[in-house]
Structures are given as C-alpha cells and as structure tokens.
Image (tube, rainbow, N blue to C red):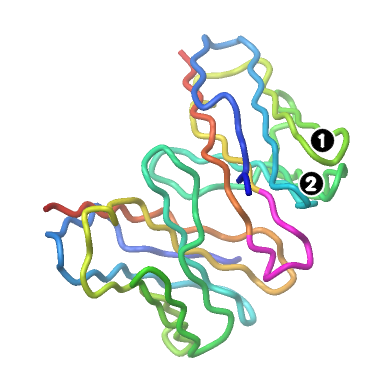
C-alpha cells in the first residue's frame, strides 16, 4: 500500500537558517504530493502541493520538488522565522482516491 | 469565509462515559471527513461522507463509534462508551468533490482526554 516516510523531529534551527525536511514515498502510479503545516492548537493547513513529476510547489518561501526518480518531495526554505515553528506533514494522494496518506509529521522549532 | 468549525475544542471525560463532537464544514463542501490524530502521528481517516451518505467507514470502530450527517451539512461523531485509548485529537475536514484534487480543509480539532 501507499506510505510516506518523513525525517524524525524535532528539527531545531536558529532564525534565518536553511531548512530541509526529508520526505520519501511509496505508491503505485503517479500520486499527487502535499505538504501540510499544523500550528499549535490548530488543524492542518495545506502549505504546497505538486501533481506530477518535476513539478515544484511553493508557498510562503517554502518549496518542494516532486522527484519521481528518487520518490521524494523534500521541503525546503532558505531562511526560517520563529513563526515557522510548527509540525509539518508530508502526504500523498493516489489517483482516484479521496483520502491522503500522511507521514508522521516533523516538528520544527525555530529559535530567535 | 468561515473555515471548518469544530466544537468543543477540548473535552475531558472519565472512561465509560459518552462524548460527542460536532463539525460544521465550509459552505458548499459536499464531502466531510472525520480523522483521528494520535500524538506524534498523522491523521487517520475514520469516516468520509459524500453529502449525507457515509461512503468510507471501514476504519470506524463501530462497536463504540458512530457518526451522522443527517442533512448533508453538519456532522456529529459520537463515542459510547469512551476508553482510555480514545484520547486523541479528532479532526474534521471538508472538500468539494470535483474541485482541485479534492483539497481538504481542516478544522482545529477536538482534543479528547479520557481519564
């Protein structure tokens, strides 16, 4: 079945540092890939997505590229802020499915 | 535009007691989802509704969990009786079928603690 593997957290960075959160997936066919963010006490919000190989999703300075050859969708940001502190979930949605498969989440803590 | 609304935000009960959660989806969204999120985990689907019909409830523990969406809008998820292992965050999400890759919009969740 489908699965998503994320790097374990927490990831602790200083403000303005470069961020990478790794995500790899296993799926049949050509899934759509997503990153969600969950701020403390809130629900998940869609951060960015990519629907086919080599697509780059981007939003709020975050970006991720759909790499079919390595089955990866790593999240990156060039300069993190304290306000980016949250839990980040990688997810995939197989064609024809309504239910995403989520990773376990990676907690990001950014210090001033 | 209001997002997905859930209530209560927090609930503490003793084991064996009943509990109910309420969700109001985004206006016009015909698909509604209930997810369970354990600490340190991603959401896991409990049930999905298309309008008022439950179309995917294979992961719902039907011996103690029930859900309804009578008019195809609001939904209620109930647990009776609650067990210690039910402590988790219960997330509601909604989407418009036929929209952009069925993008789901999540509510803030209800954090349940069973003592």
Q: Is residue B67 above or below residue B13?
A: below
Q: Do marks 1 and 2 share a chain?
A: yes
Q: Nearer the viewer, residue A23 or B77?
A: B77
Where is residue A105? Give x, y as percent: 39, 54
Q: Nearer the viewer, residue A92 or B99?
A: B99
Instruction: Tell me the residue at 15%/59% (across/down).
Output: A13
Q: Disc 2 designates what residue?
A: B49
Where is residue B87? Give x, y as percent: 49, 26
Query: What is the chain identity of the residue bearing mark 1?
Result: B
Asked if residue B27 lies left or right of residue B17, the reply is: right
Q: Disc 1 designates what residue?
A: B69
Residue at disc 1, secondary structure: loop
Q: Which residues are magenta?
A: B94-103
Asked if residue B108 lies left or right of residue A16, the reply is: right
Q: Residues within 10 Å of mark 2 (few under 14, many from 20)?
A: many
First in sequence: mark 1 vs mark 2: 2
Instruction: Tell me the residue at 57%/40% (across/down).
Output: B91
Instruction: Tell me the residue at 33%/51% (across/down).
Output: A86
Asked if residue B32 lies left or right of residue A8, the reply is: right
């Amino acid at each position: 079945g489908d699965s998503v593997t994320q790097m374990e957290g927490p990831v602790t960075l200083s403000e303005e540092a470069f961020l990478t959160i790794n995500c790899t997936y296993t799926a049949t066919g050509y899934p759509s890939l997503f990153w969600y963010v969950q701020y403390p006490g809130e629900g998940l919000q869609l951060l960015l997505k990519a629907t086919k190989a080599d697509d780059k999703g981007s939003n709020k300075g975050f970006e991720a590229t759909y790499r079919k050859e390595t089955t990866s969708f790593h999240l990156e940001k060039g300069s993190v802020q304290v306000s980016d502190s949250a839990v980040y979930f990688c997810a995939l949605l197989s064609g024809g499915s309504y239910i995403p498969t989520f990773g376990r989440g990676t907690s990001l803590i950014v210090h001033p | 535009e209001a997002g997905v609304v859930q209530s209560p935000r927090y609930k503490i009960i003793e084991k064996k007691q009943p509990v109910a959660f309420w969700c109001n989806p985004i206006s016009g969204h015909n698909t509604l989802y209930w997810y369970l999120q354990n600490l340190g985990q991603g959401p896991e689907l409990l049930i999905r509704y298309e309008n008022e019909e439950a179309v995917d409830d294979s992961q719902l523990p039907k011996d103690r969990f029930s859900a309804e969406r009578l008019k195809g809008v609001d939904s209620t998820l109930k647990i009776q009786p609650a067990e210690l292992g039910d402590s988790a965050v219960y997330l509601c999400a909604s989407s418009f079928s036929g929209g952009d890759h069925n993008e789901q919009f999540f509510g803030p969740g209800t954090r349940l603690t069973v003592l």
